[in-house]
């Protein structure tokens, strides 16, 4: 899932008109790493994970630059791949070259996509698979656009940190779906904060509070694993819980503003409303106190309960002013409000990434998104156990949530975490 925007930006069609000239100028630049046809900088997308976000990411990339084709697709389920291909082809048939022999299904579909000549891999499967797929893509010499989060546990994050260095050493680009870092209003606001507009940051708060999300009722022919995969939001091994899968966006903004990650988390949460088995075993609310270096604290809230007041926001308190980041507003001696035109960040993140590849200076956003993901994981661990969790404890945890050998068949749903009883691993 990705963030709803706090303000309405231009449509993708409006946005592409303003970026076409710059993109055309780039089209004569160096060859994109991983391109096999000499002298071309064509972007050939291989999509791994054909749900709503994967489908949307391909469309965003199409609108972000010229010279882009979709050439391969992979998903665990044939029906998801077919519906995604149909949706993408509606208005972009000329950019879709995915014959049957480049449509792959099953758990090994990602390896088959990576074996094609695709040079711009979009990873949009459930996050539990992300470290595995990132490792395979980078080993194959592919540039990667990865959705967030990039892992669901400490072992996964350790792998991702190592992959960030490996990608850099190979000259590969890795961009992440933390689209606020490519959004004009956020960029302008955080630049002023980092230039001292509110002084030293002494406290922060952020939230993603909303109602319930979608779920799919179980069908008789589905195995346990298929049911969990098709309802991946509600299983920690697949999503990391909603504090990791969704609230990571807001946490990422605070890490960005602070220029670092927290060192300790205390937290609480539970499962108060979504208690039936159809909701898997995740919590429906979290409240986390994160401690950053210098005894600066972030109060973080995440809730998915229908009928409650919503808030998707980030705020910073400085010793000389305050900043409501999501509203692009600063109060205090250097009061300021963004009055410019916001962009379309889901498109811009692809425009920026493609420009970096064609310019020979590939972006590598993997370390920052991994830090924000681990921040969310340590909050979940603190809430699940009722114990304080340090950065090092979360990073070095031995708890690996992904099954070692995943097949379609039986799989018990893990018990709901019980603070005071669930142990740190």
Image (cartoon, helix red, strand yellow):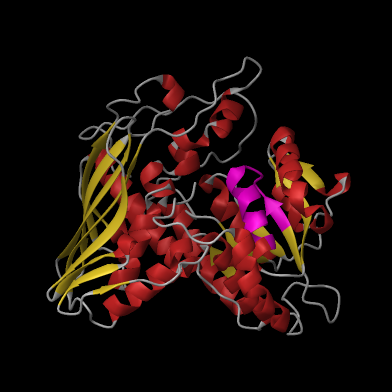
Q: Which residue is drawn at 60% across and 43% down?
A: 52
Residue at 62% x, 55% y: name it. Answer: 57
Q: In which quarter of the image is residue 309?
A: top left
- Residue 345 is left or right of residue 327, and the answer is right
Q: How far across and down, in percent of the image, does residue 332 sit?
A: 15, 74
Q: Quadrant of residue 327?
A: bottom left
Residue span colored magenta: 46-62
Q: Can residue 172 be seen in this view?
A: no
Q: Residue at x 73, y 76 (%)?
A: 32
Q: Would residue 275 be counted in the magenta stretch?
A: no
**Residue 58 is a magenta residue:** yes
> Residue 30 or 154: which is nearer the viewer?
30
Residue 76 appears in the picture as rendered: yes
Q: Where is residue 150 in the image (x, y as percent from the top left)?
A: 49, 55
Q: In which quarter of the image is residue 197?
A: bottom left
Question: How many marks overall?
Answer: 0
Nearer to us in this view, 357 or 159: 357
| For residue 19, above or below residue 61 | below
Q: Is residue 333 left or right of residue 67?
A: left
Q: Position of residue 284 (x, y in %)?
A: 33, 34
The single residue placed furthest to the left in the displayed view is: 319
On the rendered structure, is 227 left or right of 21? left
| Magenta stretch prevailing secondary structure | helix
Image coords of residue 117 (percent x, y): 81, 63
Q: Nearer the viewer, residue 243 or 139?
A: 243
Name the residue: 54% across, 21% down: 217
Quadrant the C terminus occupies: top left
């Amino acid at each position: 899932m990705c963030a709803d925007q706090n303000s309405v930006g231009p449509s993708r069609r409006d946005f592409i008109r303003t970026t076409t000239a710059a993109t055309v100028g780039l089209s004569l630049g160096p060859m994109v790493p991983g391109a096999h046809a000499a002298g071309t900088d064509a972007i050939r997308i291989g999509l791994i994970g054909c749900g709503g976000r994967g489908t949307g990411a391909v469309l965003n990339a199409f609108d972000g630059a010229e010279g882009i084709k979709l050439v391969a697709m992979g998903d665990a389920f044939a029906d998801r791949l077919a519906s995604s291909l149909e949706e993408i082809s509606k208005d972009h048939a000329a950019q879709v070259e995915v014959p049957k022999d480049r449509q792959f299904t099953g758990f090994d579909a990602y390896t088959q996509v990576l074996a094609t000549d695709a040079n711009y891999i979009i990873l949009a499967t459930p996050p539990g698979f992300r470290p595995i797929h990132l490792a395979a893509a980078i080993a194959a010499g592919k540039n990667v656009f990865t959705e967030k989060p990039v892992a669901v546990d400490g072992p996964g994050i350790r792998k991702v940190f190592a992959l960030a260095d490996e990608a850099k050493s190979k000259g590969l680009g890795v961009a992440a779906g933390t689209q606020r870092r490519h959004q004009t209003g956020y960029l302008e606001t955080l630049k002023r904060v980092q230039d001292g507009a509110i002084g030293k940051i002494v406290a922060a708060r952020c939230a993603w509070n909303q109602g319930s999300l979608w779920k799919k009722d179980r069908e008789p022919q589905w195995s346990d694993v298929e049911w969990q995969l098709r309802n991946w939001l509600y299983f920690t091994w697949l999503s990391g819980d909603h504090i990791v899968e969704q609230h990571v966006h807001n946490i990422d903004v605070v890490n960005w503003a602070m220029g670092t990650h927290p060192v300790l988390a205390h937290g609480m949460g539970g499962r108060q409303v979504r208690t039936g088995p159809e909701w898997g075993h995740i919590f429906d609310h979290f409240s986390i106190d994160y401690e950053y270096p210098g005894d600066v604290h972030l109060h973080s809230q995440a809730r998915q309960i229908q009928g409650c007041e919503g808030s998707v926001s980030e705020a910073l308190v400085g010793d000389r002013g305050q900043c409501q980041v999501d509203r692009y507003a600063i109060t205090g001696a250097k009061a300021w409000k963004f009055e410019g035109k916001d962009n379309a960040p889901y498109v811009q993140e692809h425009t920026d990434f493609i420009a970096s590849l064609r310019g020979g200076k590939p972006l590598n956003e993997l370390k920052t998104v991994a830090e924000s993901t681990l921040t969310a994981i340590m909050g979940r661990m603190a809430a699940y156990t009722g114990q304080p969790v340090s950065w090092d404890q979360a990073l070095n945890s031995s708890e690996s949530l992904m099954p070692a050998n995943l097949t379609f068949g039986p799989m018990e749903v893990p018990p709901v975490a019980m603070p005071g009883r669930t142990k740190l691993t």
